[in-house]
Image (cartoon, coloured by chain):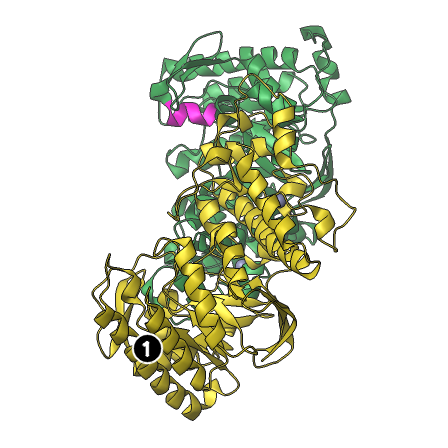
């Protein structure tokens, strides 16, 4: 795995391509970018046929150990690894420890174990069991076992933070040792986990120590949305980034909101999980990025760049039309709160709205269906609503990253930020 | 009674009155070409020419109750080879309502389904929601289960919503007997005439008359006599599959096909179990619909030639074969029972995989039946089908044995 950076701003963002990822070494992933979020290897709501109506898709699929740990015996008997088990053919597989959207009750970490929560409840993992799972899964990349519980309490003590860093390093050493002795994992890369909660001192120690180990990249843990406020997060990430080698990727866990993503990219993060489109889907909303397409070289000039908002305010549709409500959604840290980048399709004003979710969006949903139909599917609780929204939201989210990269390449980050902010200001 | 097939988006404002009834099927967009008839049974293979595409019969029509097929996109449905599916007047009349559907260029436009749609009359819902409905001469009064408002669905209104339509009918449960059944049948005939009158778009919309009559042979015969006098494009056999004895069921089916004109399609409403399909094809039915294959999929039940396979059962956790190794559907080509078993604990896509498989199973079953009719080996097809479905001949349901015997098929003993 090689990270080729075309642009690095000191103490700031990095633009480049992660090449030769995976055992086949043929895949690449542009950074800043996102992975493809799955549960048990399936993008929520989507079969492979519907998923592949989207293109391009992130070349790395994220599998969370918590959704597969309970199937350990099955996978061990299967022997051919998770990709083949799940019918995933052309993707790089990255395995993380936790599902970013599954609540993790505190108080279950010990010196020797961490716990994950699957459909059948808690599963306690020792390094031995963790590595046995990796052996059965055969991912291309995986996150090392880590004690990431530090963000849970209100005031985590310095002592607890130190312990989490120590444990995580100890787990990493053990994982690496077993990794090297496991034939099934040859060619796979381990990502070391940077812990340390909100302590700068522990963060730096964790980063420095982890960077000394033979890891392929870094997971930044404990920065989840809701765990600390934005300025502190970016300040800590910036400090950590300085300690990490430039030629290895940094994956930030638990952050998916577009505004937070941009802030963290500026702090030096390369990769994000993509659970955010799923969260938006689950609340019956559609992402409506106002991405100036002239910023996106792939689509420049094809679609008019009229802001979605203006269109909505400009046209009276029917008697049920109401002023836009979603736009004034509060910017909060709570992951479940609707963000200003979404429209709430359950709103009755969409009942007779025969426009696509987003003009110019090329996803299956927007090329085939209208807001009114989505509204109908949502109010009647039809399963197709989740399918269509997930397609659209995934398309929008990947387009958001594409536009962000294009903005970075063209020195237009400030313009890009203003654009994102403009949506918030119009309220 | 009537069931419309297809696309009533443009409504021409001219009243069709009774004397012009004769011309209805002449201008109808539906034509039936009989490709082959089984020399032994009453089975037939036909090509049904409908406005949006040719439909090969016998055919199973998946049901999309709310203008959607249970998590399956219209492209996926097309890719499975589905040429016709069902909409539902009752549900769509309530939400989103006829005016909106009209604005969306009809149900086709609303759900973006480019092939044929058959909308049923709402009759079935009157069976299942009988507490909510009051039947008067004017129509059916529903209390919307969503907001409690009263809605009157008249034959004329039902035609408005319907794209390819089966008309509004007064159905009583097939297990109800007595004067209510007779009343329903006569009302159905009167409503058929109102539907025909209201159908201002016969060149685009096919109205099927629905044969009612419950389980009374006399009433059904009367209904058949009356309905077949009207030159409608097709006939639906209704009022069955409501929990009646199978012995009564098949006799009513065969009585109906006996008296229906040969050159018109016959649609047996609400029938979808594999054995019922095969037997009723032998009895001369062309079209079927049922929510069962998609509903059962959501509980993890996959349809297979030997019955069904409950993917969620523990025994499949380590079973690395596809649901049916001979199935060519996208689910079986990619996924194993073990993976689907695991996925059921995590995501709704597991249901979608089984739904796709089950629709594919139903469509393939009907295609195989059709091919065997064309090849002149339908009786062998039936015998093979039954042998695979039942591990031993003792398990053959007696009604199926009797029904098949009535069309000269004697099942093998094994
Ligand atoms: Zn879209
Ligand atoms: Zn299949």
- Residue A214 at least partly seen: yes
Position in image of residue A78 (x %, y %): 43, 78
Q: Mark 1 points at which residue?
A: A168
| Residue at image location 41% in from the left, 80% down from the top | A208
Q: Image check: B251 left or right of A71? A: right
| Residue segment shown in magenta | B123-129
- The chain painted green is B
Q: Which of A266 and B37 is in front in this view?
A: A266
Q: Is residue A360 above or below residue B369?
A: above
View quadrant of ligand 2: bottom right
Provide the chain ID for the residue under circle 1.
A
SS at mark 1 in the image: helix
Q: In which quarter of the image is the N terminus of chain A?
A: bottom right
Colour chosen for chain A = yellow
Q: Mark 1: few, some, or many residues within 10 Å (few <14, many ≥20)? A: many
Which secondary structure class fits the magenta region best? helix
Q: Image check: A417 left or right of A123? A: right
| Residue at image location 61% in from the left, 60% down from the top | A57
Position in image of residue B78 (x %, y %): 65, 47
Q: Which of B43 and B406 is in front in this view?
A: B43
């Amino acid at each position: 795995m090689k990270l080729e950076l075309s642009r690095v701003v000191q103490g700031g963002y990095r633009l480049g391509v992660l090449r030769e990822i995976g055992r086949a070494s043929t895949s690449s992933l542009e950074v800043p970018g996102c992975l493809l979020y799955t549960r048990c290897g399936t993008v929520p709501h989507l079969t492979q046929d519907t998923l592949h109506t989207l293109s391009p898709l992130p070349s790395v699929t994220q599998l969370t150990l918590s959704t597969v740990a309970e199937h350990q015996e099955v996978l061990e008997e299967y022997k051919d690894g998770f990709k083949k088990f799940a019918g995933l053919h052309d993707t790089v597989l990255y395995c993380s420890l936790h599902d970013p959207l599954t609540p993790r009750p505190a108080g279950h970490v010990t010196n020797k174990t961490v716990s994950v929560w699957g459909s059948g409840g808690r599963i306690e993992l020792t390094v031995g069991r963790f590595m046995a799972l990796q052996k059965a899964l055969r991912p291309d990349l995986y996150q090392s076992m880590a004690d990431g519980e530090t963000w849970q309490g209100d005031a985590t003590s310095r002592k607890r933070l130190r312990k989490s860093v120590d444990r995580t390093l100890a787990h990493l050493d053990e994982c690496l040792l077993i990794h090297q002795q496991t034939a099934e994992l040859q060619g796979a890369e381990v990502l070391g986990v940077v812990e340390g909660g909100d302590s700068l001192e522990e963060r730096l120690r964790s980063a420095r120590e982890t960077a000394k180990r033979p890891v392929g990249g870094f997971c930044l843990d404990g920065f989840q949305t809701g765990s600390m406020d934005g300025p502190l997060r970016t300040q800590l990430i910036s400090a950590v980034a300085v300690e990490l080698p430039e030629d290895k990727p940094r994956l930030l866990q638990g952050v998916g909101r577009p505004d937070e993503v941009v802030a963290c990219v500026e702090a030096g993060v390369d990769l994000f999980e993509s659970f955010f489109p799923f969260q938006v889907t689950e609340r019956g909303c559609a992402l409506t990025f106002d991405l100036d397409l002239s910023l996106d070289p792939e689509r420049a000039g094809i679609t008019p760049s009229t802001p979605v908002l203006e269109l909505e305010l400009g046209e009276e549709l029917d008697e049920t039309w109401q002023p836009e409500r979603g736009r004034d959604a509060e910017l909060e840290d709570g992951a479940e709160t609707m963000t200003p980048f979404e429209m709430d399709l359950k709103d009755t004003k969409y009942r007779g709205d025969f426009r696509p979710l987003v003009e110019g969006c090329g996803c299956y949903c927007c090329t085939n269906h209208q807001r009114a139909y989505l509204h109908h599917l949502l109010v009647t609780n039809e399963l197709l609503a989740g399918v269509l929204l997930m397609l659209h939201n995934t398309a929008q989210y990947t387009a958001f990253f594409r536009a962000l990269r294009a903005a970075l390449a063209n020195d237009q980050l400030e313009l890009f930020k203003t654009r994102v902010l403009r949506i918030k200001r119009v309220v | 009674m009537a069931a419309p097939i297809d696309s009533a988006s443009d409504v021409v404002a001219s009243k069709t009155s009774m004397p012009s009834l004769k011309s209805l099927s002449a201008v109808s967009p539906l034509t039936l070409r009989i490709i082959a008839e089984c020399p032994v049974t009453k089975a037939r293979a036909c090509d049904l020419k409908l406005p949006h595409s040719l439909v090969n019969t016998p055919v199973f029509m998946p049901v999309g109750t709310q203008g959607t097929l249970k998590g399956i996109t219209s492209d996926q449905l097309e890719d499975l080879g589905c040429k016709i599916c069902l909409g539902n007047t009752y549900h769509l009349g309530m939400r989103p309502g006829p005016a909106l559907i009209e604005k969306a260029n009809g149900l086709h436009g609303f759900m973006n389904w480019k092939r044929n749609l058959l909308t049923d009359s709402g009759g079935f819902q009157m069976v299942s929601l009988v507490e909510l409905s009051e039947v008067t001469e004017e129509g059916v009064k529903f209390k919307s289960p969503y907001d409690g408002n009263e809605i009157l669905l008249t034959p004329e209104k039902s035609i408005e919503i319907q794209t390819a339509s089966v008309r509004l009918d007064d159905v009583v449960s097939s297990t109800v007997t007595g004067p209510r059944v007779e009343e329903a049948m006569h009302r159905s005939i009167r409503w058929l005439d109102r539907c025909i009158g209201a159908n201002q778009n016969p060149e685009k919309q096919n109205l099927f008359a629905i044969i009612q009559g419950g389980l009374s042979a006399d009433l059904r015969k009367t209904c058949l006599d009356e309905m077949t006098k009207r030159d409608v494009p097709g006939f639906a056999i209704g009022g069955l599959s409501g929990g009646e004895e199978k012995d009564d069921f098949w006799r009513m089916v065969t009585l109906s096909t006996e008296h229906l004109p040969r050159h018109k399609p016959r649609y047996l409403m609400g029938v979808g179990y594999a054995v019922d399909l095969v037997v009723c094809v032998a009895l001369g039915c062309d079209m079927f619909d049922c929510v069962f294959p998609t509903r059962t999929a959501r509980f993890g039940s996959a349809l297979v030639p030997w019955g069904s396979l409950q993917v969620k059962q523990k025994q499949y956790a380590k079973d690395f074969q596809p649901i049916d190794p001979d199935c060519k559907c996208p689910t079986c080509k990619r996924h194993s029972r073990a993976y689907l078993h695991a996925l059921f604990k995590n995501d709704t896509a597991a249901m979608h995989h089984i739904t796709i498989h089950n629709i594919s199973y139903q469509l393939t079953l009907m295609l195989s039946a059709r091919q065997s009719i064309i090849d002149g080996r339908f009786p062998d097809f039936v015998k093979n089908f039954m042998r695979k479905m039942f591990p031993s001949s003792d398990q053959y349901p007696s009604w199926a044995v009797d029904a098949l015997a009535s069309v000269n098929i004697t099942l093998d003993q094994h």
